[in-house]
Image: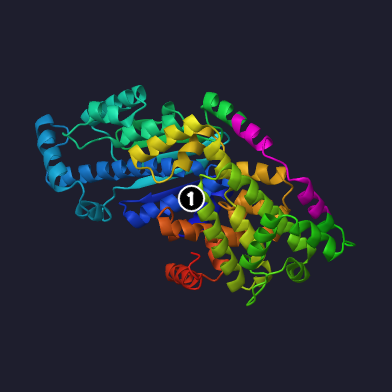
Amino acid sequence: MQKTGEILAQLEKNKNINIQFSCHNEDFFKSIDALFAKLLAKMDMLYLLDYITTILREIIANAVKANAKRYYFKKIKIDINNPEEYAKGITNFKSKIIGKDTIENELAKTDYLVILSIELANDGIIIIVKNNSSIHPVEFERINLRIKKAKEYNDFTDAYDDIYDETEGAGLGIVLSILLLKNTGIGENSFSILSDKKTTKAKFTIPYELKPKTITTTIKEQILDEVDGLPSFNQNLLELLRLCKNKDTEIKEIVDKIIIDPALTSDILKLANSAGFFMGKKVKHISEAILIIGFSNLYDLLLVSSTRSILEKRYSKFHEIWNHCTKTAEYAKYIAQKFGKEKNAEFAYLGGLLHDLGKLILLATDSKFSNWISDLTKNRKIRSSTVLEEVSIGISHSMIGELMAKKWNFPDYLIEVIKYHHSPLDTNDKYKDFVFPAYLGNMLCQFETGKYNYYYLEETVLEKYKLFSRKDVDDLQKEIIHNSNGKI
């Protein structure tokens, strides 16, 4: 496949693309995952990624397997329309072919093809997977039964027990797809399979507006109430922020107001030293710090320090998010320093610290709901509970974070980082030097957990930093970890 960024550009220009192939491997699927990661990020629907790519993998695998079955039957000269021969052939196919790469590699030399079509329609993203072989009547009967049964269930375990079929393989891919479509709010009726004498087509549409209005409306209202109910900054901080904006302010006025709050004093010094304002020197006194960084940068430090203080007290249990934000900040700072934007290192650091603010609200909005999500995540071994939160609520953590940032009058560059840390190409050009380091830092953090990999990275960001290969990215990550003094 060509670069996923180029494919996405073609899709946005022409409103549709076709990707043709005869077989698949893990690299192919990683490219498809990366393409949809970028597409959904642009739509502010990245929380659907795991669901959509899971469905796509199932449908694509089924399409290739269907072609492989036809090719295999022809190869061993079995009449697929003869019930007795079909039963014999399918047994051999299951035991000798399924799960092996040999037959799929042979498909590359035949006329059997699969086409993945993606269309940006007015009401949603239409996805079609078409293979050039028809469905056998026995297969079509089983498929329709599975689709019908899947619509009756909300729990995959119950569906598994009822539908598992050893004669043709488990056949649970369609069931899983239906359940995922239902649970995301896309809707089980979005999915269809049609076949004529020459082709088979599986289709579903991702609407731009999801359907679970009862859940969405209720919890969205709770989220908005939660954001609205966040404490305002105290009077001393508001006065400090006002003084920082006044060119006639004396340093002593600011120092006197900071030192009356020991916790704020400690936080400002810690942030100022961590963010990279003072290269090769540790600053211990507020007055010295202000002289070096200036009123404008102090303003940003005061905002970040006070925001973290408020949220850590209110949402102290979310250690994983706080740790991730701190690590992302270190990555972002290093990236900004290394690639010629050292003056932006402190801003990149602050953006990294705050990029995931929305997750705190998302996970804290409804305790019963969060407990249910936590149990489901554990039982189904899903790698992140956040995706389930977002897909059930219908609002992204980036959007929630943007609301929070605007409530507290964050500077524009911080709002941009929070809003676009998953879709950096959508940010305004003048903010790219702030958003790109936070984006890449966040992605490198996710590399460590296995959530993302090289294929997911935006080529435009990599080109900006002259990272032209997977090795370049791996070397950068090793370099950052090596030079982080244990902070990463």
- Image point (21%, 43%), residue name: 69
- Image point (40%, 55%), residue name: 450
Q: Where is residue 359 in the image (x, y as percent from the top left)?
A: 55, 44
Task: Tell me which amino acid carries mark 1.
Answer: Glu
Q: Where is residue 401 in the image (x, y as percent from the top left)?
A: 62, 45
The image quadrant that residue 334 belongs to is bottom right
- Image point (38%, 35%), residue name: 376
Q: Is residue 240 magenta?
A: yes
Give the magenta part as a residue range. 222-242
The residue wearing badge 1 is 320
Classify 156 as above or below 50: above
Nearest the viewer among 342 and 322 is: 322
Judge from the rendering whether residue 461 lies leftward or rightward of residue 239; answer left or right.
Answer: left
Q: Could one spot residue 429 in this view of the protein? A: no
Judge from the rendering whether residue 12 lies leftward or rightward of residue 258; answer left or right.
Answer: left
Q: Position of residue 306 (x, y in %)?
A: 68, 51
Nearest the viewer among 234 and 213 is: 234
